[in-house]
Structures are given as C-alpha cells and as structure tokens.
Image (spheres, rainbow, N blue to C red):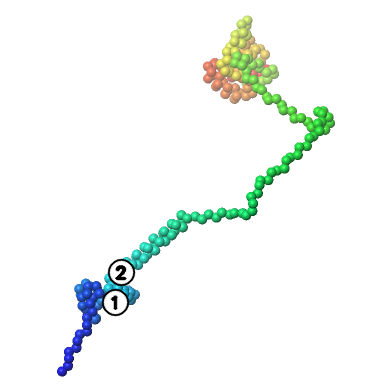
Amino acid sequence: MSTPGVPPQSQPCPRCGAPHGPDQEYCLECGQRLQPGGGVFGRLAAVWQQRLGWYPGDWIWPVLLFLLIAVAGATAAIVLADAGNGSSTIVATQGGAPHSPTTAPPTATVALPTVPAGTPGAPSTPTTPPPATTTAPRPGSLTSWPAGQNGYTVVLESIPAGSNGRALALDRARAASKAGLPQVGVLDSSLYSSLHPGYSVVFSGIYTSRGQADRALVAVNSKGFSAAYVRQITS
C-alpha cells in the first residue's frame, strides 16, 4: 500500500507572513511579489529580498533613481556656488632690501658775463609792445566824415543852413548820439555832390556798401527815428 506524497512545506510571505506555495508568484493576502521577475529589476528585487527579507515593489527603483539625481544636482550647485564666491589673490613679492629714492644731483649754476647793451654780439632784450587801448566815444560826442571818402550813411535830419541852422543841427546830432546811435555827425551838404546844397545834414554811421546802411537803418528806426533814410555820400 503506497503512502500519499506530502506536499512541500509552504514559505511565509516576507511582508505579511501568509503561507504560499513554492511556485506562487504573488501573495494572495498583500499582493507582495514572491518570485523575482526577469531583467535588471528582477535581479535587484532578488538581492533586496535576500538582504532585507521583503521587497516593496518595482516602483522603488525609479524613486531611488530620482532621489539620486536630485542629490547629485544639489551637490553640484553647492560646489559651483562655493567656487564662484571664493577668490584667490596672488601677491607677487620681490626679495631684497627696499631701495631708497634716488635724489637728482644738484644743478650747477654757471654765471654768464654781463655784456653792456649796445655792444656788438650782445643779446637783444625783447621789447613787449604796450597793450592796445580802445576808447569808446562818449555819449553825445560827434563824428566827422573822413575827408575824401565816399560811402553810405543814414540821414537822420536835414536842416536848412542859416544863422541858427548849424547850431540846431549840432544839438540834434548830440541828442542822437546820447540815444545810442553810432558815429553821429553833421555834414555841410554844399561840400558833397550827392547832396542838395544849403543844408546841415545830421547823419549816423559811415558804411562802404548800401547793404550795411540798410541794416543800420533798421536799428535807427527802432530807436524812434522813423523819418531816417539811407543816402549815398559822394565828394
């Protein structure tokens, strides 16, 4: 009579302790993987289970890889920050005793013989010309027309010559000069071919061109001499 075979002894689950068969791949109680899978994860799971007696699952490997990358990145950032903040200073030194500053030798002074002025070969003394002085005409002063010069002027007033005509023209000319008009004077019209004879002509300015006189006329009119006009003066 044959003896029935004895089933092989079951192994407990490393996670929950529930019994399982030798060929059972997962625990029926907690879902723990009992047989290691193939590939790299399978071999790692077998080593984990042999060392610790339990295996959490294949999800543990991506988590560990992520943590490893995070730690490596943080370490690299800290190292780079320390390298940027630190600075090394290299000081070049030169041996030997310090040198004292070199003093330039005193300059020898040679006295030259004195040569009287006027002696041949004697150095000439530079002569500095005196500064030029320009005196502005006083307000009320009058200007004479240059003899023999032709040009243009601004006629302020023509007063008939007579006993008081010359004196009245001089008074009008001084008043115009005090008003700020330039080069004010009185002309005897009988001496100039371009003017009607018999008048004392009060003028302002001596100009070489009609354009200069026209520009001066604008300034004269602005000072209240609205009757002024430009006239050519010919000897």
Identify the residue shown where x is 33% and y is 74%. Answer: 44
Q: Which mark is residue 36?
A: 1
Identify the residue shown where x is 59% and y is 10%. Answer: 171
Left or right: 175 as drawn, with respect to 34: right
Q: Position of residue 24 (x, y in %)?
A: 23, 79
Q: Is residue 232 visible?
A: no
**Residue placed most toward the observer, 156 or 30:** 30
Location of the N terminus by quadrant is: bottom left
Type of amino acid at the residue the image marks with label 2: Ile
Mark 2 — residue? 60
Decide: is 151 above or below 83.
Answer: above
Left or right: 167 as drawn, with respect to 124: left
Few, some or many residues within 10 Å of mark 1 (<14, 14–19, 20+): some
**Residue placed most toward the observer, 63 or 133:** 63
Decide: is 65 above or below 151.
Answer: below
Decide: is 66 above or below 38.
Answer: above
Secondary element at image label 1: loop
Q: Position of residue 169 (x, y in %)?
A: 60, 10
**Residue placed most toward the observer, 129 or 50:** 50
Type of amino acid at the residue the image marks with label 1: Pro
Of all residues, the one furthest to the bottom in this rendering is 1
Of all residues, the one furthest to the top in this rendering is 163
